[in-house]
Image: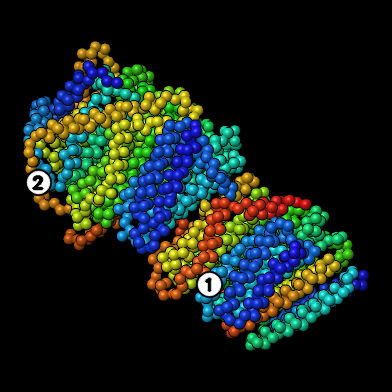
Amino acid sequence: MLKVSAVNLLLVGVLLLNLFMLGTSRIRALIQAAALQGVLLGVIPLLIHQHSERNAGLIAIATVLLKGTVIPRMLRRALREAQIKREIEPLIGFVPTMLLGALGTLLSIAFASELPLEPQHRELLIVPASFATVVTGFLLLTTRIKAITQAIGYLVLENGIFIFGMLLVDAMPFLVEIGVLLDLFVGIFVVSIIIHHINREFASLDTRRLASLKE
Amino acid sequence: MIDFQTLLVHFALLLALPPLLLGVINRTKAWFAGRRGPPLLQPYHDLARLFRKEMVFSRTTTWVFRAGPVITLSAILLAGSLVPFGAFDAPVRFSGDLVLFVYLMALGRFFTTAAALDTGSAFEGMGAAREVSFACLAEAALFMAFVVLVRFSGSLSLSPMFHAPMIASLHGLSAAALFLVAVALFVVLLAENSRIPVDDPSTHLELTMIHEVMVLDHSGPLLGLILYGAAIKLFLLSALVLHLVLPFTLGNPLLDWLAFLAGVGAIAVGIGVIESVMARLRLRAVPSLLIASAVLCVFGFVLTLV
Amino acid sequence: MTSMPSAIAIELAAALCIGLSGAPGCLRRRMRAGGQGTATALNLIGSAVGFAGLVLHARGGETQILLLGSLPVGRLAFALDGLAALFLIPILLISALGSLYGSSYWRDAEHRHGGRRLRLWWGIMGASMMAVVLARDAILFLIVWELMALAAFFLICSEEERAEVRQASWVYLVATHAGTLCLIGYFALLGHAEGSTALWPSLGSDGSDWLPTSLFALGIAGFGLKAGLVPLHVWLPGAHANAPSHVSALLSGVLLKTGIYGVVRVCGLLPDPPIWWGAVLLGIGAVSGVLGIALAVAQQDLKRLLAYSSIENVGIIVIGVGLASIGRSLGRGDLVALGLGGALLHVLNHSLFKPLLFLAAGNVLHATGTRRISSLGGLARTMPYTFVLFAIGGIAICGLPPLNGFASELLLYVGLLRAAGVDPAHGWAWAGLAAPALAMIGALAVAAFVKVTGIAFSGTPRSPATAHAHDPGVAMLAPMAALAGGCVVLGLFPIAAVPLLQRAVAAWDPVLAIATPPLPVLAPLGWVSAAGAVLIASVAFVAACFGRRRSEPATAVTWDCGYASPTPRMQYVDASFSETLVGLFDWAVRSRRVLPELPGPFPPASRFESEVPDAVLDRVVLPLAGATKRGLSQLRALQRGPVQMYLLYLLLTVVILLMVAP
Amino acid sequence: MNQVLLLALIAWPVLAAAVAAAIASDRRRPDVLPVAAAGHLALTLVAISPPSPSSLGGWLALDPPGRLVLLLLSVLFAICAIYAVGYLRYRRELSNRVFVPCLLGFLGMTTLVVCSQHLGLMWVAVEASTLTTAPLIYFNRTPRSIEATWKYLLVGSVGIALALLGSFVLAYASLGEDSSLLFVDLLRRADHMNRSWLHVAFVLLLVGYGTKMGLAPMHTWKPDAYGEAPGVVGALLAGGLTNCAFLALVRVFHICQAAGEGAYASRLLVVFGLLSIAVAAVFMVGQRDFKRMLAYSSVEHMGILVLGMGLGGFGIFASLLHMLNNGLAKGVLFLSAANIHRAFGSKSVDDVRGAMRRVPLSGTLFLFGFFAITGSPPFGPFVSEFLIVSRAFAADRFLVGGGTLLLLLLVFVGMGRTILPMVQGLPSPEAQRTTYQDGLLTGLPVLLSMALVLLLGLHIPSPLEALLRDAAAYLEMIP
């Protein structure tokens, strides 16, 4: 029971971080928030696993390492290399995006309540939190202009999916979890390389310049 | 089938009478104009004179120019053997001979117009163009009339078809249908022989619009053939129309022959009268006249359906 | 009985021989005159073998299927029945004569690039057309059908360096692909109804009524596109006009007939089709005939004129097929025999005189370098043989006695009139209305071909090239002479074709065919021969009466009503010749005119131009296509470039799908 | 032997990739490709012949559809490997240090996708294959190619992420005693699955793997990627990667059918199929860039694949057959298009004229490839498309069948209007200045794949037919 409330507490934190990420205007803060979210996610498996502590522990460590430290560092490096203004340029303003995010959260909660859950997951906020985070990721991806902010959006999207994975921390084999994390890592790695090249070719990370291929 | 005893009489009439028809027409017109006019046999004299004359050919012409009148005349003569005269069946008759009749006429037209174009003269080209253009409508009208008669007679041969009215005309509706067909056929007759109101044969050659202008360059015997053929064509169509205006027989062969001659003469007089009292139509108006005649036949056809 | 498979085998061997005729040439090194003789020889041999096979088939009994193996979903099934045999004749004839003609018309010396490719596809086309009529399996049929279509495409764009050729071949390609798609639908539906891909099945009439109807519609659309029925004829004029002339001959003489073949098979689908099938076909046929020939009269391009007259002839043939279908619905064997017999006889006839005309046009094009009728003239003097052959073709195509066109049209007239008038109780009177239409078609055909012979061949030359034209060599004249001979023979002795027709009709509708008197009883074919003979005799006689007179007659300049020195430019030209008729059909033909404005009493030199666009292609299809393209290009805004937009599509898709999820 | 076979099959290309990376010289490096391809093909032929191998306790195995895809993949890669050697000779100015290893890595990862019998593992493999292809698209090092890569990476990764979420949801739907993510277990427990979770899972997986396949409206990365990538990469993506994604989708669809939700899934598949064909047709009309046009053609045929799958019955057989036909025909088109691109130095239709005279072999094959891909007999795609339309009629879906035929006509017009002017006519003088000529290495592979397409149209070899029938039967069978 205690575990459950603790987990929900963490998830609420995650949701708040979502809104913050949608609202903030500074890329550095955005990266911080994403990293913090990663750390929070890393803690959750330790709380909700039934058995197989070892795997849960390993996963938690890997998650915290990757999402909390390594990936944010890569992003910061990309940011440093690209000599760009630290402001986030939204396609639509911050307030509208926040409102959309809030709306998305509400919808996710409503939608999640439609779906039947296993008895041991009834009280948990996992499903709504996961969907809300996914929506947040999408919002970052679709409303932000700088390539790097989109990368962060992708990271947040993955976080949301990771949250859903908590439901299956027992069913899901260790190998797959690690594989997923590894893929995420490589993905972000390749993305940051491409960001590097974009910056070199276009002297900016403004994706509005990446619109020469069209009908 | 062919029966030879009528064949002789038939061809005798076919070859002898047509120029006389022209004479009758001219006399009628003269009478209306208050002149004495040429003697009835004048056309024979003209033909005889032409056949004696020399020929002059344009340098641009080829064998088509010479072949045209010859083939036309032969086609018309052959067609003539299919047409029943008065109460008598045609010497040659078989199921489907009506198609042969129409297509022989068409063959004649093909060569007349080809010969006209062979001279390369603008006038004759003009005439040929009008001839073929109006024929499209005239042939449609003619065939529409034939369809009605086929429905009357249940036969596909000219002789039974044109003798059918004798039986059918008792019925009121069919009498109406027959009347429509008769009018249409008469219009076709005028058009095919380029008489007024479609064309005026008696004007000076260059000013006539269709037939005469096509034969500008023909001279001597060839011209004679052409005129002779035209006369035969007129005679044949008049014989066809005759069946519809007096659809009965007297029973006695001699009387029937006389009735036939009188009838054809009467039609010739009628043509003469029309030529005297009517003016020539504007060229643009000719198609509507022919279409009208075709429509009459369609009405006749519809009447046969009820 | 046992001779039958061997007959099929012989036909297939012939097809193989023809199909490979172009291959040896391609094996030679480039730029070396390759295998022209070989190709022609193989074509001739192949068609000889094919005719031998036909003779064998004529001896032997009824149809048997020859199975050679399997395809991914179908079987390699062939069969040779009366109908197929009849359609094989034009294929064999024209592919042989055409290649003979082409061997000197399309020399490698003049056509370095195209030559060997043309011969290759020529062979393939001949073979695939044979396979089309022999095929007895839907998949096999579609394969050879498309092979034929592609071969025709490559033949049409033999001179692809010319823009108009590319345009014409493109229009053809779209049309034929549309047709193929219709046929794919047709055979898919047929397979659904029959449960097999075997051809040609006859459905039980108990099937739900919409299925045969939709099959009929699909079949007529698919095959009608190939046959060139109005309004599906859009590809035909351009393709025929721009292909090499012997290819035009093959297209018009044979390719269109495969479409007719399909239409005939489609009409054989039901044992007792609804009468409106036949009525629709009669209507389509009449419209195609009248409009086709009306447009032909209006044409100013020799080969386009011939192409439109092909549409007219296809219309005539389809009238016959419609009559046969009506006869089938009424259970009247005489109508079936006369309608289908007339149609098939006209198929044979048209495959004689139309190639003849196209080859003659080829001679003219070869000698003068132009297809414009109004710049020709006087060819009767410079190219006498070509003129005679063209005239024979022209008279025949107008259906005038004593040539072959008359016999087939006579059968149709008799059939239509019998349907209207004879035994009215079991008749369908409205069929009678098609007879005047046919008569009008005939008269218009006379107008069209009088115009060509008169303007292009008679008179005086209108251009220097025309003045120095000359007849081609015997290698080009001989095939034409053969075709002309065919026209005369079939015209004088149509009886000769009767056994073929009887077998074909029997293959199409065995039930009614048994109870029907033979064609010569139904139609006066004997009288046709007699009339022809008498006509020729009387012409000879009258001519003789003049022949013995006088020495050389005097010659003079054409009498131009007193004007002493007429020039070639004063002659009547084709546009003015057809002016009246174009005016008469203006509602369909819609000619474009550029009238000169004549300012003041002494106007400067000015010109009058008129052209006749295709009623359907230029006024309906192309504008429609343009509008569609513009409409679709509006949708391109969906892909403007920003990746955010694309990601939004993903999100929306997911959301919508989750909303509609049950 | 049976145990290690699949491991070898996956490890061999990866090994080759390592070797290629180790080789220093740009000249020598490409020669690794044919060797690796030959080895892979040999192993494949062993693997697809019974007994079917499996290893890692059933995580790696070859199910009947897998055999088909593996065969196609291996053959296509062999063809492209030969071609790549010839192609890279013309691109000496660019280093292939990344290109060649990534090609081989791509082969390894796609093989892993085909062999993996575990939902999660399959996802990992698909994502990995996405990552290995990104550098391939970026080969030309131009701003446009960066843009293409960026879009490919972002859209692809997000799509794949959705697929991951879908996999999790599916796993959750079948949660219970002794549940695992092995397909056998999922199939076995299908009828206990929770319906509403299953629907969510299928939607997410459809969108996710559909993005990878390039179904409309998730196809947006395709024209950019195919347009900017080298032709050989385009061939591999259109013929290989998309089919792997299709295989993944088919496996999920199979589970849905087993769970008794086939009707719902089929409806979605048919809808997406028709939508993809329609969208492709719309964007093909008036297309000026012939490589982008091929991309849309790929979208269209992905649509046809899912359409056939959704129609069920012998539509499944047809769809699998069409997968082979389309893969090989795409090989013909992309490779010959690449040759034409080399010869004219432009991929805009306005600059390309008379390809049949400038590069006779490539031009002619391009034209015939066009006829093949538009479903003209006697080429392979005709058979499969005919079967699919017949299936639509047989299932009384007459509107679907008729609509498909209409759209196919529109596609034909759109493609033909673009392609015919390219191959016909006289080439412009600029075209004569480029050095490219059809050679053995760049011509033969195209000819080879064309021959295969033609063969499939006229006669399907009995072993292949057996494979197809097994696969169709396996997908129709519901445990």
Left or right of D273 on screen, residue C406: left
Q: Residue at x 64, y 68 (%)?
A: D39
Residue C204 in which image quadrant: top right
Q: Crowding near pointer 2: few (<14 within 10 Å), some, many (20+)?
A: few
Q: Residue at x 29, y 32 (%)?
A: C492
Single out the mark in the foreground, 2 or 1. Answer: 1
Q: Which mark is residue B10?
A: none
Q: Residue at x 20, y 32 (%)?
A: C539
Question: Depth check: A93 or A204 in front?
Answer: A204
- The three-letter code of the residue at mark 2 reads Ala
Whether residue C377 is visible: no
Q: Which of the image's four quarters has the C terminus of chain C?
A: bottom right
Q: Which residue is mark 1?
A: D86
Question: Depth check: A91 or A80 in front?
Answer: A80
Count the labels in the image. 2
Q: Which residue is mark 2?
A: C556
Instruction: Say if C3 sits above or below D19 in the image.
Output: above
Host chain of mark 1: D
